[in-house]
Amino acid sequence: MWLRRELHGLTVNATAGATSRDYFSLFHIEPNFKIDEIALEQVYHSLLSQFHPDRYAGKPQVEQRVAAQLCADINAGYRTLLGEVTRAHYLLQHNGVDLKAAEREGVGADFLMTQIILRERLESIAEGDQAGHQAVAREIDEHYSLSRDRFAEAAQGAAWHDAARYWQEMCYLAKLVDATDARGR
Amino acid sequence: MVLLQIAEPGESPDLTVARSIAVGIDLGTTNSLIAQFDGAQVRVFEGASGQPSLPSVVHYGAESTQVGGAALALANEQPENTIASAKRMLGRAREDVADDPYATLTTDGALAFATDQGKKTPVEVSAAILDALKIRAEAQLDGPIAGAVITVPAYFDDAQRQATRQAAELAGVKVLRLLNEPTAAAVAYGLDEQAEESSLLAVYDLGGGTFDISILRMRAGLFEVLATGGDSALGGDDFDREIARYVTTELAMTDPTPRQRRTLLGIARDAKQALSESSAIEIDGSGLGGDGQKIVLTRRTLEALIEPYIERTLKACKQALQDAGVESVDRVVLVGGSTRTPAVAQAVAACFDQTPLCTLDPDQVVAMGAARQADILIGNRSDDDALLLDVIPLSLGLETYGGLAERIIDRNSTIPIARAQEFTTARDGQTGLVIHVVQGERERVADCRSLARFELNGIPPMVAGAARIEVTFRVDADGILEVSAVEQQTGARSEVVVKPAFGLDERDITDMLKASYEFAAEDMAARKLAEAGVEAEALLEGLRVALVKDGDLLDRDETQTLRDGMVRLEETLQHSDADALRDSTEKLGRASETFATRRMDRSIQSALQGISVGQLDAESSE
């Protein structure tokens, strides 16, 4: 517990969040990777309908300021918890994982190779070859789902070292998914 | 920031007793409107001749200033003194704008028009239009306007929003909120329907000078903008210009004078409107000093001329759908005068595979929605009203090593939002760094829009990579950005509210306000005092209520400190010193921030408890 607190204190500064507010407790959900997205959205909407700056029009400026700041946290937190990659990242930070060390360690050589091959295949698809594009897109999606499920499993078992590696795989593959979408347009 | 308040000094700003007058203003490129929601319906204020729209034209003659129709009437006579479409230049730098077809631009200093009354910036021109709208509405109302919602194109960037706010400040209009135009239109449509089911709506808004597309999800109690896109320099004016160019070529005119150009644009606009009804028209070129030639313009030719522009709007529509993560929408709404062009409506219908809705006047729908939102924001409505969640149109980021843009806040993020990112130094012994804030989607900084540059100094010399600099971006509900940077170990700090470098600074605004005949020195002083009084009273009243309700959140010392501050502020209220009053209010406000935060945290708990027993269970069992 002491270790976790200590590390947590360090990593908050590296978080892409505005304050040290704990998003899981803000949204009243358990700090797991698997979350109830519908419940998250409902809490999000009910928090916003209470604290949105529109509800504070005409109130003293100090209240408007504090409400706007809280609302900014609510929006940032919702965005963080809604996305799988950002949620995974946040969960790692939340559990005090040393992400810098994890990044130095990187992903496995096999994964890197797979990733490079997928990218090459994506780039070599001829213009207008819809079937070919769809096939690669499906394959990338499958790889992403696999890394995500592995992350979920590792996180569930508090195997943070493995989880940090799967999270990096998710990052690589999510970028590939974006690239696929961009080419498919 | 100058605030216009309705309450006199000593009068309590109790907004629940009397109905406060709040208006919606559509500050358009070609036409502007002002409207009010009176509790039952929206009223668009008409001008003396019964026209709801005020041409966004200002004439700065040697003798006098005219706004609207009167200015437009002088356009042919004195084109260089008559400024139209100033909105295109609002918040823009000189290098952003092509030559103005209407007036002459100054060649040095901030972007401005050269007139017989000297330099006039786009902010001043917009302020003159806002002022005319305010006068028009107040002449038909029982009292002064307490606040306004001003609409801006969703695709307006930070600088353009700041410039709009400055114009309002200059005109003495208190801005309750800058509202995106398509969102305002959705409010006007949506509130009439009160759909229980969640539905998706696309708002296609093609005005004179700007194009916006927004995708919204609407359900009872919530309007959520999912994605927005567009082009803040594309509109019906481009159609006119294309037609004018065509006519120029057909008539073999070389280098038309400003007056001829203006005449050409008038002809073009008439031709465009006529072709909405007929399939071909004849243009008489004799008024242009040519040899009296007549040319024929068919609808088909017009469509070919404007096709590239329509194509650009459709591309943005597809991008917005993708950004929203949806494939189709339930309804499409047309907004803006340029959607009257049949080719535009047809293209939108084909793109969204349905007949677009235009049951509300496309020229008035934005002002109508703004008026409704203004009524809510001034406090005339209950908390049960629909909540509006809007987004920022463009990503915000920083320049990093190698001229690359590092994104901090993604486009289509719901506002207000704050995000922080940690950076470090690149060289050993580096004691300062330049923070360059950019807006846009491209990877290279050179391709993004530069918003501001500021420096963070006082970092103690360390090896490269050892400093920990946290940069925080905050975007408020108007879409306006504030950036701060803190070196974590030393606490060295620097921050800016991002101000357009080519806009006006606070001093310019103060000078202009002073110079303005409307705000004589004593009026200014009285107004400042009244504003400070209202804010002080509001704070005191708020704290009194809070201490009764949540006083247990403070320990004895904290309570005493607050009470002392309140007594001091009450004393200051007895004297007519605006600066002291403002200062005292600011101090007490800061001192009570912790209290406000704790109270809000307490209400989060009760808000969440409310759901877990009530609607959450009910909805999850559906």
Image (spheres, rainbow, N blue to C red):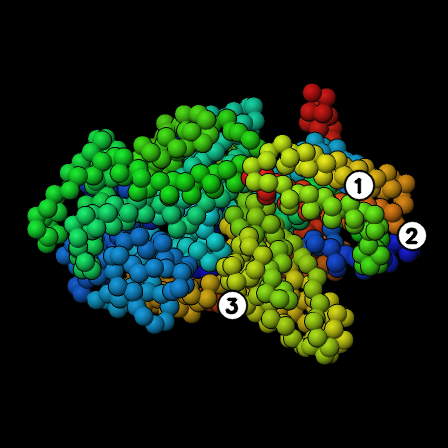
Q: Circle 2 — which element?
A: loop
Residue in the image at 8% along x and 51% along y: B291
- Residue closer to the observer: B251 or A33: B251
- Amino acid carrying mark 1 in the image: Ser
Residue in the image at 90% along x and 41% along y: A157
Q: Circle 3 — which element?
A: helix
Disc 2: CA contacts within 10 A as few (<14), some (14-19) or many (>=20)? few
Q: Is residue A4 above or below residue B34?
A: below
Q: How many labels does the image show?
A: 3
- Residue closer to the observer: A28 or B136: A28
Residue in the image at 56% along x and 40% along y: A127
> Can you see residue B34?
no
Q: Position of residue B449 (x, y in %)?
A: 50, 59
- Amino acid carrying mark 2 in the image: Met
Residue A1: which disc? 2
Q: Position of residue B514 (x, y in %)?
A: 35, 67
Image position of B194 (left or right of A84): left
Depth-wise, is mark 3 or mark 2 nearer the camera?
2
Q: Is residue B334 above or below residue B228?
A: above
Q: Distance between the residues labelled 3 and 2?
A: 50 Å
Disc 3: CA contacts within 10 A as few (<14), some (14-19) or many (>=20)? some
Determine which quarter of the picture holds residue B517: bottom left
**Mark 2 belongs to which subunit?**
A
Residue in the image at 47% along x and 41% along y: B315
Residue B147: which disc? none
Depth-wise, is mark 1 or mark 2 nearer the camera?
1
Disc 1: CA contacts within 10 A as few (<14), some (14-19) or many (>=20)? many
Residue B580: which disc? 3
**Mark 3 belongs to which subunit?**
B
> Between disc 1 and disc 2, whose residue precedes?
2
